[in-house]
Image (cartoon, rainbow, N blue to C red):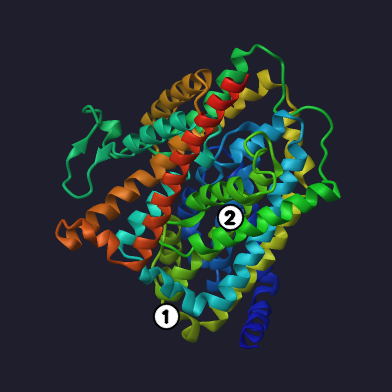
Amino acid sequence: MDVLQNLAFGFEHALTWHNLMFCAIGCTVGTLVGLLPGLGPLATISLLLPLTYSIPTTGALIMLAGIYYGAQYGDSVSAITMKIPHASSIVACIDGYAMTLKGKTGLALFTAGVSSFIGGTVAIVVLAWLAPTLGEVAFLFGPADYVALMLVGFVCVSFVTTGSLVNGLAMCLIGVLLGQIGTDVTSGVQRFTLDFTLLFDGVGLVSIALGCFGIAEITKNLDEKTNRSPFNGKIKLMPTWPEFKRILPSALRGSAVGSFLGILPGGGPVIAQFAAYALDKKVSKYKHEIGTGCIEGVAGQAAADEAAARTSFIPLMSIGIPENAVMALMMGAFIIKGIQPGPNMIAGHPDLFWGLVASMWVGNVFLLVLNVPLVRYWLSVFKVPYNVLFPAILFFCCIGTYSINNNLDEIVVTAAFGLAGYMFLRFGLDSAPLMLGFILGPMLEENFRRAMLLSRGHFGVFFQRPISTTLLTLVFGFISWQILSFFLKRLRRRREMAAA
């Protein structure tokens, strides 16, 4: 009952004309940011942060939050229509772009929009009910537990890859090695940089994503020498009732996964999308279709992406710990306004806390309007012939890459990964496992080092904590099951050949 009263109190602040205007601005800007290749919420919030000095506190934070989850909501458009992802829409490229090639672009974007709305709504309920206490879950995870959690992420490679498991593991390993490039944060030693100054800070995630997915796909399409658009035929937006019934279970599963992983530092939308996709490929009724242009492959990851974007505010506002770079910027915005996020925030600034929570649902409605009824208008841009459209796409890719550090070297790195991505496509290799390895590799190394330092080099630390022990048991069980399944398949084939 207290939660309902608090939400009603929050809506009183969120539904004022000024806060509604700032919420609409944030959601619109975030959606446009999601559409532009390379330009993400981190760069946008950092550019707009100085403007918050002249905006009322609640309105400024509502606008910045709207940009963040609006970008998570809108970045699926470029991933689905052109296979140009942001960090949080990498998985959307798999089934979303496959649906585009089948002429189902409108259905894919409708699925992503509705699933994101469901994921955001579920996460807001979790945020409202459990924020005062759920943030403490993050304190239960130590370095050893995070190592086990990262290993669980690595075993998901068999679900993420659309090719053979061996090729997927090889691509994942390449991603891990790419994540080691740059300056070692512990010793300050340059690793695998080959004395190139552009590699001293490592390889950027945006450069790899735009190169291996966007530029590689554009090059492949041009190489085919066919006059094509990103999608063909009449835009079918509304799903049939059987199709809509397929969306709901995956969206709810993705919402649960994203809501949980959004709480954990180092989790968030990037890992949530992989976890939700892996779960769907395991338990979905249509799991054998996922990877070939299936609704479930879009719905689950979109819901997880949006849910994690919402619940990532829980560690920030309840215990004062930002879980990613965007939340660190949000924390800076709080401090600029003279507010210290943490356990005393709810009691000291209830109008701000509950107003921000309520505004997230208002923003969810704004984003549903922007991304579902207006899908036809978003797609009208892509009706331009491909030989005219691709230079504009490459132009925005270059702008997005350059805007990160204002460095032309980033464009060179992106072009190099574009060439590598094109070769991957020609050899039938999937780039999604590479991204998974690149994201999880450095996090695994960092937490492994911490665990070893705290245990003074004793490996038993991974089996002394209940969380890490449980997760590692799941990893070993999954690997054993995969090996057993492999040998059983070979034995079945031999029997079939002998019988023939």
Q: Residue at x 72, y 24 (%)?
A: 229
Residue flagged by tag 2: what amino acid is it? Ala
The quarter of the image holding the N terminus is: bottom right
Q: What x and y, as percent, mark residue 468? A: 35, 61
Residue 431 or residue 182, whichever sits in front:
431
| Numbered disc 2: secondary structure | helix
Report how far apart the C-alphas of labels 1 and 2 lie in the structure. 26 Å
Left or right of 408 on screen, residue 227: right
Foreground mark, 1 or 2, reads 2
Q: Is residue 394 visible?
A: no
Structural crowding at the residue carrying mark 1, measured as other residues with C-alpha within 10 Å and reported as few (<14), some (14–19) or many (≥20): some
Residue flagged by tag 1: what amino acid is it? Pro
Structural crowding at the residue carrying mark 2, measured as other residues with C-alpha within 10 Å and reported as few (<14), some (14–19) or many (≥20): many
Residue 451, quarter of the rendered image? bottom left
Q: Residue at x 64, y 69 (%)?
A: 359
Q: Residue at x 43, y 83 (%)?
A: 344
Residue designated by label 1: 343
Residue designated by label 2: 304
Q: Residue at x 33, y 39 (%)?
A: 179
- In this rendering, the answer to whether 266 lies above or below 218 is below
Give the mark, 1 or 2, whose residue is nearer the N terminus. Answer: 2
- In this rendering, the answer to whether 102 lies above or below 41 is above
Residue 192, quarter of the rendered image? top left
- In this rendering, the answer to whether 171 lies above or below 461 is above
